[in-house]
Amino acid sequence: MKTPLISSFLIAFFFLLSSYSIVTLAQPFDYPTANLSTTWTNNVSAPHSVSFTDGSTVRAILLRGSFGPKFACGFYCNGTCESYLFAVFIVQTNSGSGIVQPAIGFPQVVWSANRNRPVKLGAKLELNASGDLILKDSDGSHVWSTKTSGKSVVGMQITDTGNLVLFNAKNAIVWQSLDHQTDSLVPGQKLFEGQKLIASVSSTNWGEGMYTVEVRNNGLFGVIESNPRRVYYRYVINGSDKSKERSYVRFLNGSLSLFIHSSEPSRPDGVIAVPVASSAQYMKLMPDGHLRVLEWQSGWTVVADLFGVRSRRLM
């Protein structure tokens, strides 16, 4: 017969064990942050490596969230996978933050660091001790960096809005991918006067193509980078500036809003309608010059072609 002391001990032990299990199971399975002095190598045995039936592969370095379409960053390839981007992409995840649905949940790249100089197997990404994020090819050659050495960076994070961030000890942003657009915008992102979206040459040639989208001090323009440059889309906003901020457009839920002579919280000067999101969305300038909005609907679907719809000025 067990003594009361032993029984009490066993009850307490099992209670603690049960509590520990509950706490452990409640921990998040995602891996959204990284510390300094961390290196990742692009190889086939890397963790969080998933291949898809469209020929693409991702090797996730950071991933934010679980269950459904979520943002991650890491190495990405498509086609023969002889070359790779360091990119931010949307992937489908299960409740444990595993990357799933290889037959339909194809990764969607929304930002990349080295589109004009892809790397090979064996390439390394390093967040070094001085706070610089550096990409080197398999031969050790320098490909790209954030140039943030000595700027008090303490870590790297992928946010739930798809922003890759280097931050300091006060959690202030030192560098962010949203300031360095490629061919896409994620919800909430701005494109300022002086910045461009630049389409890729093709779906497998990620180099900068001939179609661009830019904001000017009188509107939004699609341009063919020929000689001379030719405008193939224009949305002109007449009037005089009422804001000291640079003109910009912002991808909001339900619109691409133009703030040309005004800025938030004022109403936009004009809008291009976008279907209200029922799931993950992003906007991409395609290799054919169309600015399309894609949404996850049991597969990625084009839900709007913004240069093919009637825009609206707000008075």
Image (spheres, grey):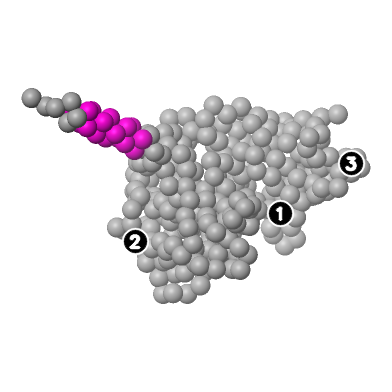
Q: Residue at x 58, y 29 (%)?
A: 277
Is 253 in the magenta?
Answer: no
- Which element type, helix, strand or loop, lies under badge 1? loop
The 10 Å Cα crowd at callout 1, few under 14, some 14 to 19, many 20 or more, is some
Mark 2 or 3 closer to N-term? 2
- Which element type, helix, strand or loop, lies under badge 3? loop
Q: Predominant secondary structure in magenta?
A: helix
Q: Is residue 181 left or right of residue 118?
A: right
**Depth order, front residue of 111/52:** 111
Disc number for residue 195: 1
| Coordinates of residue 166 in the picture (x, y in percent) | 57, 56
Is 18 in the magenta?
Answer: yes
Q: What residue is disc 2 on?
A: 43
The 10 Å Cα crowd at callout 3, few under 14, some 14 to 19, many 20 or more, is few
Q: What residue is disc 3 on?
A: 242
Q: Is residue 300 above or below residue 50?
A: above
Q: Residue at x 41, y 39 (%)?
A: 28
- Mark toward the viewer: 3 or 1: 3
Region in magenta: 7-24
